[in-house]
């Protein structure tokens, strides 16, 4: 039996303001129990495309009126997620994800990102035929390196033509949110705060306040992961050092983004195969 594989792949330098990352995951040949075939994802401002080259995947109900798992298409588009999500692979599976900054997607395609928040759809329901042809080629590719080459050959010229002035490589959500605010204030004739907020909502599907919350959530994400290596952590000190009002504020933020308290998340990251995305992200 082989071990499950998960990898985070950085984009080329020219696409670092557009593509946040590529994610590769395979459980082919791995001996996993049913609960280990779940995939826990945090809330995220990102959107993108997922490919399932082997196996099946189901989006599990969120508790907000969903009544049954949703079988995901082999090539799917996902919008920004305002809450944590869980998917399930009934058996061995292999997949790949392109994680795009939402403002970059808007610049590339003109899609209304706000209409895609918390939605997962077949790619052809969102993007045009050229994107679908590229996506089919990626689905048929034999390895991750080939997938990245196909995606970047398609996106790079379009990004060069469409990129927004002032867009810079994304190192953290906090830097990105601050950059969005500056670009929104500098764009167009109107420079009022309300007009800037409307631009940000059009580019990302979310308000600046929501994005700032996500930037703080990224801090929760990394700090909880780093606590795995430390073995134990003083959550009150961590909360204070991260700029939270108190430990309760920190815990509420963690639950909003991951669905779990910081301590439970730390333990699940250490022990649970289904929390693989938390271990590789960074």
Image: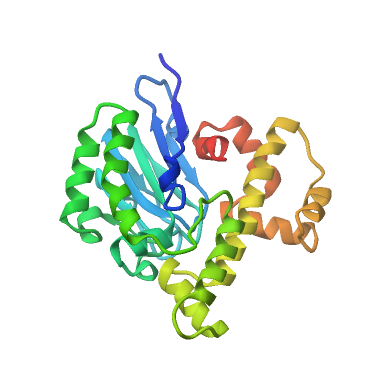
In the image, what residue occupies the spot 29% across and 38% down?
Answer: 52
Locate residue 40, reporting x and y percent. Answer: 49, 44
Locate residue 156, reporting x and y percent. Answer: 32, 48
- Does any portion of residue 212 appear in the rendered image? yes
- Which of the image's four quarters has the N terminus? top left
Kindly indicate the quadrant of the structure image that contains residue 11: top left
Kindly indicate the quadrant of the structure image that contains residue 210: bottom right
97, above or below 125, in the image: above
Q: How many marks?
A: 0
Judged left or right of residue 273, residue 61 is left
In the image, what residue occupies the spot 25% across and 26% down?
Answer: 142
19, above or below 277, in the image: below
- Which of the image's four quarters has the C terminus? top right
Judged left or right of residue 259, residue 90 is left
Rendered image coloring scheme = rainbow
Locate residue 125, reporting x and y percent. Answer: 22, 60
In the image, what residue occupies the spot 44% across and 56% down?
Answer: 101
- Does any portion of residue 264 appear in the rendered image? no
Locate residue 185, reporting x and y percent. Answer: 54, 76
In the image, what residue occupies the spot 52% across and 72% down?
Answer: 207
76, above or below 215, in the image: above
* Of residues 7 and 263, the one drawn nearer to the viewer in this rendering: 7
Judged left or right of residue 219, residue 206 is left
């Amino acid at each position: 039996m082989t071990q499950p594989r998960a990898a985070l792949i950085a984009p080329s330098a020219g696409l670092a303001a557009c593509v946040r990352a590529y994610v590769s995951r395979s459980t082919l040949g791995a001996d996993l129990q049913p609960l280990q075939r779940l995939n826990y994802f945090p809330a995220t401002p990102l959107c993108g495309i997922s490919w399932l080259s082997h196996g099946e995947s189901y989006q599990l109900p969120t508790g907000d009126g969903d009544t049954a798992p949703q079988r995901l298409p082999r090539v799917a588009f996902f919008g920004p997620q305002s809450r944590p999500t869980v998917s399930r692979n009934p058996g061995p599976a292999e997949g790949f994800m392109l994680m795009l900054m939402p403002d970059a997607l808007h610049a590339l395609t003109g899609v209304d990102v706000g209409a895609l928040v918390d939605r997962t759809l077949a790619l052809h329901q969102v993007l045009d035929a050229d994107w679908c042809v590229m996506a089919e080629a990626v689905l048929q590719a034999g390895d991750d390196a080939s997938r990245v080459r196909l995606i970047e050959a398609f996106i790079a010229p379009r990004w060069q033509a469409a990129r927004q002035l002032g867009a810079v490589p994304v190192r953290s959500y906090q830097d990105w949110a601050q950059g969005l605010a500056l670009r929104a204030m500098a764009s167009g004739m109107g420079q009022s705060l309300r007009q800037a907020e409307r631009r940000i909502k059009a580019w990302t599907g979310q308000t600046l306040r929501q994005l700032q919350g996500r930037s703080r959530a990224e801090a929760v994400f990394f700090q909880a992961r780093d606590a795995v290596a430390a073995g134990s952590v003083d959550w009150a000190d961590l909360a204070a050092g991260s700029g939270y009002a108190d430990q309760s504020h920190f815990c509420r933020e963690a639950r909003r983004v991951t669905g779990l308290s910081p301590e439970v998340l730390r333990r699940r990251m250490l022990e649970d195969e289904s929390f693989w995305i938390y271990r590789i992200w960074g």
